[in-house]
Image: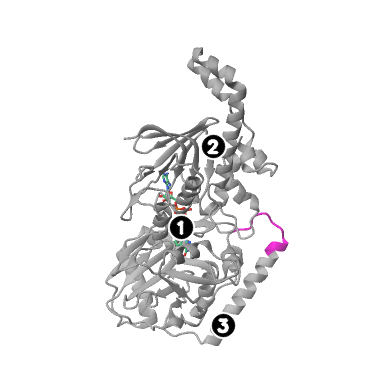
Amino acid sequence: MDSSSSSAVIIIGAGISGISAAKVLADNGIVDLLILEASGRIGGRILKESFGGVSVELGAGWIAGVGGKASNPVWEIASKFGLRTCFSDYSNARYNIYDRSGKIFPSAIAADSYKKAVDSAIQKLRDLESNSVDDVGNGAELHLTAKTPIELAIDFILHDFEMAEVEPISTYVDFGEREFLVADERGYEYLLYKMAEDFLLTSEGKILDNRLKLNKVVRELQHSRNGVTVKTEDGCVYEANYVILSASIGVLQSDLICFRPPLPRWKTDAIGKCDVMVYTKIFLKFPYKFWPCGTDKEFFIYAHERRGYYTFWQQMENAYPGSNILVVTLTNGESKRVEAQSDEETLKEAMGVLRDMFGPDIPTATDILVPRWWNNRFQRGSYSNYPIICNNRVVNDIKAPVGRIFFTGEHTSERFNGYVHGIDTSKALLEEIRKDERENESKSFLLEPLIALSGSLTLAQSDAVSGLQKCEVPTQLYLSGKLGIPEAIL
Ligand SMILES: Cc1cc2nc3c(=O)[nH]c(=O)nc-3n(C[C@H](O)[C@H](O)[C@H](O)COP(=O)(O)OP(=O)(O)OC[C@H]3O[C@@H](n4cnc5c(N)ncnc54)[C@H](O)[C@@H]3O)c2cc1C
């Protein structure tokens, strides 16, 4: 067991943001780091699992935003390491909408319903914008008028899926409107291992570096102007000058990590304002295909009077020919409901829906996989869901440091929250450390006579001397926009 080891920086969480933060620090010569990860692996919400003979992505599955003027950095890394991907064409989904008797809605009706839903949502969005309210809910306002099964189904795919027509999606705006599904046996997480290889000791695909500690659940962060003490569930204690916390917004909203002293009110208020989206991909394996195939049939939709009831389906034939796998996506309330029931019950419901669409004679799935992101105490949901018209202050407060604790993770990115890429990493901390070093150099020069004396002082007195090398400027100055991050903490 580690007892009270000390590092320059402790990074909590080894998802994409924790690993990229560590890489930025290491690339800049800060190698005295420690990564504490609660689970037994790196990757966080980038997670593959073997299912039905192939590798499926339970978390992030798509590289969203490709083909535009600017290059998507995740796409660049994926291309560099030869990750196998498959283009996803959502544009036909609206022409594959099934009613409960298995009939496909005529394309004219589907197109018309789709246009009406988009127009009405855009109009409502404009109304909300012109009301200049600070924070406007998470989309519920946009879909109040959907009533019939087809309207509800379209509404679900417009809002619970990102189909660019309604809310401008920053990944599309910045990087292009194409999306590629990762279909690689090594998984999306392979990119993380390749990133880690650059700065951690690895051998044959395994990370051997003892600066990465798995199964270390951080339960307490005790912080002061001098540093941070990190306590883990197994009773270990680690000291650091700084901490970077990459736990998800759902975890920050839970009581998993206790802060001593508690986080200030502006911080907890901001954390509380961000909604958590639950997004669940349920995988079903069949003995043979009974659904129509082809590139224009990759996605299909089930129109039911209950919004989001097994609405959005994807067949995996384009990604993995011959795999005979279907994926259905549930969100929020439906996700939580399904997480709480047995997989047998979920299988029964899903088969009921498939039999509505394809008739009573289709075979029952031989296997089912139901991820449980909501009930995972290291995730508590799938990704952050900021209000549609959001005062930037909320995101800024969520990412602002508190003393020596810095925050990173998808929820701290103004433009790309909810996605794998664009995550703010440790550049702010890096500047802070550099500044700290410069200040310490000049201050220790000035304090040399005092420090020389400290040999004859009591412990408390010498602490006070080292305390003289620090000064505190309220983090609120950072928040008021008067200071940048480094100035705010020093
Ligand atoms: C179902 C699903 C589908 C998605 N689809 C896409 C997609 O198609 N495209 C896309 O770009 N993005 C997608 N995302 C979002 C994407 O996965 C995330 O934005 C991204 O992976 C978040 O990375 P992160 O490092 O910020 O957080 P995480 O990956 O959650 O990393 C945080 C890490 O912190 C650890 N941790 C938490 N608490 C503690 C603690 N107390 N002590 C120590 N460690 C702790 C966790 O175990 C975790 O490993 C999806 C996510 C989900 C769940």
Q: Is mark 1 within 8 Å of ligand 1?
A: yes
The reply to whether the magenta stretch includes residue 129 is yes
Q: Which residue is mark 3?
A: 111
Label located before the other in sequence (2 or 1): 1
Residue 449's x, y, as percent? 59, 17
Q: Are marks 2 and 3 in contact (CB under 8 Å)?
A: no
Label 2: element kind: loop
Q: Are marks 2 and 1 in contact (CB under 8 Å)?
A: no
Q: Up-down: is 258 above or below 143?
A: above
Q: CA distance from mark 2 to mark 3?
A: 53 Å
Amino acid at dot 3: Ala
Q: Which residue is mark 1?
A: 382
Q: Quadrant of the C terminus?
A: top right
Q: Is mark 2 within 8 Å of ligand 1?
A: no
Q: Quadrant of the N terminus?
A: top left
Q: Which residue is mark 2?
A: 404
Amino acid at dot 2: Arg
Taking the image as four quarters, which one is ligand 1 found in?
A: bottom left
Labels 3, 1: front one? 1
Between residue 353 and residue 329, name the one nearer to us.
329
Q: Confirm whether residue 343 shows in the render.
A: yes
Label 1: element kind: loop
Query: What's the residue at 46%, 77% (across, down)?
Result: 301
Between residue 6 and residue 480, name the one nearer to us.
6
Label 3: element kind: helix
Q: What is the magenta segment's predominant secondary structure?
A: loop
Span colored in magenta: 128-137
Residue 108's x, y, as percent? 56, 87
Query: What's the residue at 56%, 59% (across, down)?
Result: 416
Between residue 298 and residue 113, name the one nearer to us.
298
Label located before the other in sequence (2 or 3): 3
